[in-house]
Image (cartoon, grey):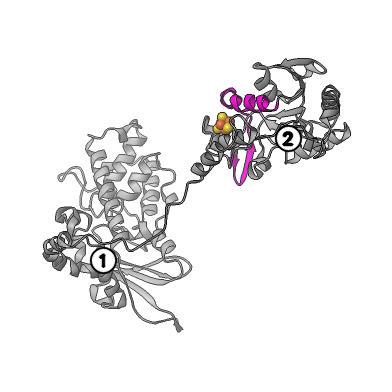
Amino acid sequence: MQGSLFSAAAPAGRPWPAGPNFADWVAAADVALAAGHAPESLDWQPAKGAWREQRRGDGAGLPPGFARYAAAAHAHVGAEVRPRLYRLLWRLRHGEPGLLDLAADPDVAMLRRWERAVRREAHKTKAFVRFREAAPEVGGEARPRYVAWFEPEHRVLPTLAGFFRRRYATLAWSILTPELAMHYEGEGAVWFGPGASAADAPRGDAFEEAWRVYYRNIFNPARLKIAAMCAEMPRKYWKNLPEAAEIPGLIRAAEARTQAMLDAPAATPALHCGPRPESPGGALQREAAALRPGSLPRLAREAARCQACPLAGPATQTVFGEGPAQARIVLVGEQPGDAEDLAGRPFVGPAGQLLEGLLAEVGLAREALYLTNAVKHFRYRPQGKRRLHQNPERAHIEACRPWLENELAAIAPTVIVALGATACEALLGRRVALADSAGQRYRYGAATLLLAPHPAALLRAPAGQATALRARLCDSLALAARLAGPEATPPTTDQRPERRAD
Ligand code: SF4
């Protein structure tokens, strides 16, 4: 740079060299800051050295917010960029931490203009680089190389190296520009070489015709808006775009083609996809309507569409209760777990298996009971690939309570066993200390309500506590069996009462 940025009359400052990359500027600015060199005391020298891919972490150590703007603005071709970025950094580090919020500040305004210009140029480069097939031999292998000629206004190639490397990861390619060229061999790192000319890039391969055909096919003459088209595809890029050769002819013919489209008789739809299939929700609704109102199958189908609380969104499906409609004992748990959510059935996970074993110990068969949960959707927190159980909140319990009440109304059991605090809260409408309620009997309508620990609590508890919890759960299940009487055992098919689920 010649003299000082800030005053043409100011004397030349201390020469301050830095390589061409953004990381080089960050390192040089770091040294200058540490040495306490004020912006006007430095004369940033023209960049010299090798280019390399610009990476996201190159601005590490810069103030938050500034790094993103600076990383883009650094690619601007303006001669003042490096000194002006240093002045901004100096001000941010010397008592103006909120500087970037001052949009009217000349330095900040300039930074934003540069950043916008570079970002736009980068976007256009991604969209308008057109590769052509070049030399078929690379390093003695029969491997094509794809070469593009492009004339960006700013030095965006190093900022786009990662993008092109990922997009054309297995191809050998080069992007040539007047200032520098970016190369990739289909593996390894992107590397940079000196600038080139349009004559160094191949012209006229099969891809060019493909681009023209593509553009002719997507061009809609009835929607022609020349100003909008030129804003999206500025004329300065046309000379390197094969499809741009089609544009003048397409514009000239647009009016006539539009009129022809208007004059043509309406086309008969060529595709016959058959009647629109019924949506899953619609099918459930239709099936539900065919079932007796208030019956368990109808409730289950209606609940399958429930969206009454936010738990329906992330969960796989509604897990409704299951068991005979004439069951004398109903067990109510908390909510489905991971396994239940996937299977669509209650108590099929580890806690369910434990429960089945305990039921067998007290002489009850799972098939004779109705098993359900206070909340019908799985509440969880994702952690990597795992879904970690989360207790339902009171709002979820309240939203889901009608389904539980309807299930119990349909079954009219003799005994209900609430397993765990959530089920107790759902059935009693208040929280109770489970430890104090061992052996106590409550009323739920005409049924006796017993409170017991949830089998999952046995799995989580330390060995000493688990034994006590197990004993309390077994006692409650045994009491439920006694209260329900012989009807609690599974009836054979011949003995089943008249009442049917639907
Ligand atoms: S948790 Fe209950 S209330 Fe909430 S969406 Fe599921 S079924 Fe409906």
For this rendering, which residue is in front, 338 or 230?
A: 338
Q: Position of residue 422 (x, y in %)?
A: 67, 24
Contact, mark 1 vs mark 2 (Cβ under 8 Å): no
Q: Is residue 386 magenta?
A: yes
Residues shaded magenta: 382-411
Within 10 Å of the Cα at label 1, are there few (<14), some (14-19), or many (20+) other Cα atoms? few
Q: Is residue 48 left or right of residue 139?
A: left
Within 10 Å of the Cα at label 2, are there few (<14), some (14-19), or many (20+) other Cα atoms? many
Q: Position of residue 272 (x, y in %)?
A: 38, 61
Q: Is residue 406 left or right of residue 185?
A: right
Q: Amino acid at mark 1?
A: Asn
For this rendering, which residue is in front, 188 or 399?
A: 399
Residue 393 seen by the camera: no
Q: Is residue 128 magenta?
A: no
Task: Tell me the CA gap for discs 1 and 2.
Answer: 62 Å
Say if 265 sits above or below 347 in the image.
below
Q: Nearer the viewer, mark 1 or mark 2?
A: 2
For this rendering, which residue is in front, 326 or 56?
A: 326
Q: Which mark is residue 81?
A: none
State the residue position of label 2: 324
Say if 166 sits above or below 343 in the image.
below
Q: Place residue 348 in its image quadrant.
A: top right
Q: Which mark is residue 217?
A: 1
* Residue located 41% across and 63% down the image: 167
Q: Is residue 489 left or right of residue 46?
A: right
* Residue located 27% across and 74% down the image: 209
> Secondary structure of the magenta portion, mostly?
helix
* Residue located 39% across and 46% down the image: 31
* Kind of element beneath mark 2: loop
Q: Quadrant of the C terminus?
A: top right
1 or 2: tag closer to the N-terminus: 1
